[in-house]
Amino acid sequence: MAIIGEVLFMRRDGGSVSDVVRHVEGQMQQQVDAYDERKFDAQSDAEVVDVLARDLSVEPLLVDFEKGEKNVEETTISVRDVFGDTGSVPGLILTKKFSFTGDADLWNFGTGQWGSMMPRGEIYGRTLTVGMEVRATDSDAAVQHITSTVEQIKHYLELQKAALDPFNAALPSQLLPLIEARRARRGSAQSLLDKF
């Protein structure tokens, strides 16, 4: 039996969604300062907040579990018997594919909770594939694996959303003081120019 894909919601260096949030928070001042000067002067604080909050928000992963595409392929798999001899037997590759939205990099970040069995899957573009390659006689094990993996993924997505939603909701209130400070600096600079 071979599980398809890599471990999801985990980085080798241990990074988590909270690290993503801290990174974005560390970029806020830079993003405010880098905002186009002409647009900044022409827009209200609320308009600048809206644009930057959209740009800086971290969109949680959202998987369309209702429209999963099931697939079964016949294959031949190599097996080893108790004596160490190898042979080929009929096998099956069972997969289920789901489309998703959100920041695809989030598949590689932990959620702050770990289980003994992390879900595995393959990410390609905007598609998540879960599945297993098994002997033809073990097809029920693959079905059970897919069902279990989908439930694990749903759990981790809930944890991810719970971590990101408050951050995204707080972005406007975190950005506004930075924007007001930039306006004050620009006003002071303009006052100096008016003196000579």
Image (tube, helix red, strand yellow):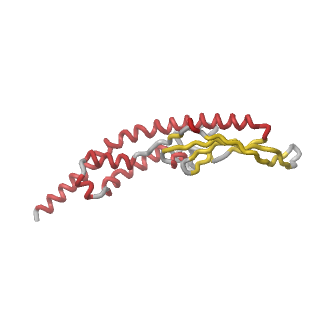
* Residue in view at x 63 percent, y 37 percent: 149
Q: Position of residue 141 (x, y in %)?
A: 73, 36
Q: Position of residue 68 (x, y in %)?
A: 59, 39
In front of the other: 23 or 171: 171
Quarter of the picture containing the C terminus is bottom left
In front of the other: 173 or 77: 77
As drawn, the residue found furthest toward the bottom would be: 196
Question: Is 194 displayed left or right of 115 in the figure?
Answer: left
Q: Which corner quadrant of the image does residue 174 belong to?
A: top left
Quarter of the picture containing the N terminus is top right
Question: Is 167 displayed left or right of 33 in the figure?
Answer: right
In front of the other: 84 or 169: 169
As drawn, the residue found furthest toward the left would be: 195
In front of the other: 159 or 77: 77
Q: Which corner quadrant of the image does residue 143 belong to?
A: top right
Q: How many numbered discs?
A: 0
Q: Position of residue 164 (x, y in %)?
A: 44, 40
Q: Position of residue 44 (x, y in %)?
A: 24, 48
* Residue in view at x 15 percent, y 62 percent: 193
* Residue in view at x 63 percent, y 47 percent: 6
